[in-house]
Every structure is written in C-alpha cells, then in structure tokens.
Image (cartoon, rainbow, N blue to C red):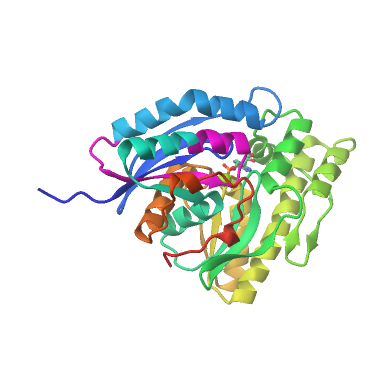
C-alpha cells in the first residue's frame, strides 16, 4: 500500500472568515469556509464569535468529509493576533478535535501564516513582505531565525482605515472592494494627509482627512485619492526595506492585497529597482484555513507542537515573537 503523506487540518477564525483546510506535503487537500459579513456597521468581536460558534461544526464536518482519505497528523489553529472572543471559539474547537483525533495541537501566528502560504504558492524564498489586512499592516523580512518588522502602522491597519471611511461614505462592510471600484471613475487627485515616520506609517489622520474631503469633493475623487495616498505610503516603506536588506523579491499578502491598484504600484516600484513582485491568488491573500494548515505542517515538521494546557490564545501576538524553526 502507498504510504500516505502527512496532513494537517488548520482552522482560521481570528476575525471575519471562519475557515478550515487540510494540507499535505504537496497540496491543499480540502477546504471549507463560512465568512461573516455584518449587515450593519463594522465587525463586532462578539457578533463574529457567535457566528463562528454557530458555524464551526459544519465547517469542520465539511472539510473532514472532503478530505476523507487524508490521515490527519495534527490540528493547527490561529492562536493570535485577533479578536479575543473569536480566537477562544476557534481554540476550543481545535483543542477538542486534537483530543478526539489523538493528534498534536499547533498554535499558529496568523501573520506568519499569511507569509508562509504566499512563499509556498509563489515559490519565493526570501522576500521583503508587505502584509496588509484589516487590523494589521506591516513590512517584514526574515533574518536570523525570525521575521523582523521593518515598518508597521502606528494606529489602525489599512483595511480598517478603508472600511471605516467606506462606512462613513455609505458602503456596507467591507468597504475596501467598493472603494476600489468607485475610485475607477475619479477625475482628480486631492492631496490628503500622508504620514510616514521613519519606517512606520499611520492611517487614522488620512481617514479623517478623507471624510472631511467629502464635504467639497466627489466620492469618486476621494476614494481614488485615499487609495493613492495610502498605497504610496506602503510602497515607500516597502521600497526602503528592499534597499536596506538588499533583497530582490517582494511578496504581497493580506486581504487588501486583492487591490489591483496596490499591485500595480508595487509592480512599478519593483520594475524601477529590478526586483521581482509576487502575489498569490486573492483567495490565499485574504484570511483562509489553508494558510493555517500549511504553516501548521511546517511547525509540525520542526517539532513546534503545543500542549493543550499551554494553548491559551494570544490576541496581541506579534509575528516577530515567533521562533522560525523551519527556515
Ligand atoms: P484580511 O483580514 O486579511 O482577510 O483582510 C480583510 C480586509 O481586506 C478588509 O479590510 C477589506 O476591506 C480588505 N479588502 C478586501 N478586498 C479589497 C480590495 N479589493 N481593495 C482594498 N481592500 C480590500
Ligand atoms: Mg489576516
């Protein structure tokens, strides 16, 4: 009989996308998800956690049914960063599953998972990473056993900034994709607050400036100017990290990475510097179960499993705290 490849079941649920996947050493074997989209307002941690609690049994059943032939070697879950109530809901399910299958438990840092799935799917070894999602915005790169943060937001993540402005402008959550669509019909660029301090950036002043600008400019022009200003800040810092590290590749990840204009601006910068630009399919840039399962597999192979009694969630877990034992 052919020997089965090691498989890990991973569960993601730090914020909006409750999702699970099974990954083996060569491919994504199965996946299932239940995204939470509020009908009114933004993401409320308790409401999102209630959604996750009501859907997690179905999501796990679906992924196990689709991956019925996989032999699960470990259960991985996103242990942080994220909303406390959401993290605890997912962690409880992951612990129960690991105990019932009698396999090890693995606590995955959500940001590291965004990076590792991108490196895997794009086949890029040692990039400078621009990680842009709802709550997080960071420029990172690997050195000496850790992903180091070269620059990050001083206040809110770029996705949150887009979503907050979007809600004010009358878009339903999440605003990011609607802002991108609306920006395509702009006629003018309006200067807005541009904040880069050292290698860090900030988005809350820009969000306020964009809200104020709606009093005298069209929605299309403000959406366009918001994107141009925010993305220029991100590209500036990413370019400086590239120059500083002397690396030759850029990897984009996180839900905001779906944005075509951001990819275009990064691509232009890369062409100017003779660097290569990589971005996985948007299904794997947004929050997804496969990134947790795949990083879980890397961690399993490097021995980074977690006793249940030490598996408390870490809502503020930073990616530069993680010892990278697999590189
Ligand atoms: P994540 O938490 O990584 O799944 O990212 C979610 C964030 O991505 C939300 O803030 C969305 O508004 C944002 N987002 C998704 N698609 C786009 C897009 N096309 N342009 C800008 N932001 C987007
Ligand atoms: Mg994320």
Residue 92 pos. (x, y %):
48, 35
> Would residue 85 be counted in the magenta stretch?
yes
Q: Quadrant of ligand 1?
A: top right
| Residue sitting farthest toward the left | 1
Look at 46% across and 56% down and name the residue there.
Answer: 116
Instruction: Judge left or right: residue 153 versus residue 8.
Output: right
Task: Give the residue displayed 77% in from the left and 54% down from the top.
Answer: 202
Question: Residue 224 appears at what percent x and percent y?
Answer: 73, 45
Q: Position of residue 300 (x, y in %)?
A: 37, 55
- In this rendering, the answer to whether 70 lies above or below 116 is above
- Identify the residue at image location x=47%, y=25%: 55
Judging depth in this view, the residue of 208 and 154 nearest the camera is 154
Give the side of residue 226 with respect to residue 97, left or right.
right
- Picture layout, residue 93 above or below residue 314: above
Residue 79 as seen in the image, left or right of residue 158: left
In the rendered image, residue 325 lying in the magenta stretch gets the answer no
Q: Quadrant of residue 236?
A: bottom right
Q: Can the viewer see residue 300?
A: yes
Check the image and report above or below for 77 versus 116. above
Is residue 31 visible to us here?
no
Where, quadrant-wise, is the C terminus in this rendering? bottom left
The image shows residue 22 at horizontal and vertical percentages of 35, 42
Q: Nearer the viewer, residue 63 or 246?
A: 63
Q: How many marks?
A: 0
Query: Is residue 239 or residue 95 the one in the foreground?
Result: 95
94 relative position to 204: left or right: left
User: What range of the chain is rendered magenta?
Assistant: 67-91
């Amino acid at each position: 009989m052919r020997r089965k490849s090691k498989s890990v079941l991973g569960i993601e649920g730090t914020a909006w996308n409750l999702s699970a996947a099974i990954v083996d050493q060569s491919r994504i074997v199965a996946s299932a998800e239940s995204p939470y989209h509020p009908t009114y307002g933004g993401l409320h941690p308790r409401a999102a956690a209630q959604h996750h609690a009501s859907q997690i049994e179905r999501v796990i059943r679906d992924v196990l049914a689709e991956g019925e032939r996989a032999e699960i070697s470990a259960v991985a879950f996103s242990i942080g960063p994220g909303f406390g109530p959401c993290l605890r809901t997912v962690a409880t399910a992951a612990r129960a599953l690991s105990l019932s299958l009698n396999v090890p438990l693995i606590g995955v840092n959500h940001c590291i998972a965004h990076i590792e799935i991108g490196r895997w799917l794009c086949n890029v070894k040692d990039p400078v990473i621009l990680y842009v999602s709802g709550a997080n915005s960071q420029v990172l790169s690997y050195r000496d056993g850790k992903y180091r943060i070269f620059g990050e937001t001083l206040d809110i993540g770029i996705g949150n900034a887009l979503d907050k402005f979007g809600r004010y402008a009358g878009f339903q959550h999440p605003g990011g994709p609607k802002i991108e669509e609306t920006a395509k019909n702009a006629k003018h660029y309006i200067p807005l607050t541009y904040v880069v301090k050292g290698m860090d950036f900030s988005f809350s002043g820009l969000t306020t400036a964009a809200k104020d600008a709606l009093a005298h400019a069209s929605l299309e022009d403000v959406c366009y100017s918001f994107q141009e200003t925010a993305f220029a800040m991100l590209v500036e810092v990413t370019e400086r990290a590239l120059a500083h590290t002397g690396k030759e590749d850029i990897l984009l990840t996180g839900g905001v990475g779906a944005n075509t204009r951001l990819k275009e601006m990064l691509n232009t910068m890369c062409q100017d510097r003779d660097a290569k630009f990589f971005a996985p399919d948007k299904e794997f840039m947004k929050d997804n179960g496969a990134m947790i399962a795949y990083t879980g597999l890397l961690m399993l192979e490097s021995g980074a499993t977690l006793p249940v009694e030490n598996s408390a969630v870490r809502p503020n877990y930073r990616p530069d705290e993680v010892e990278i034992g697999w590189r």
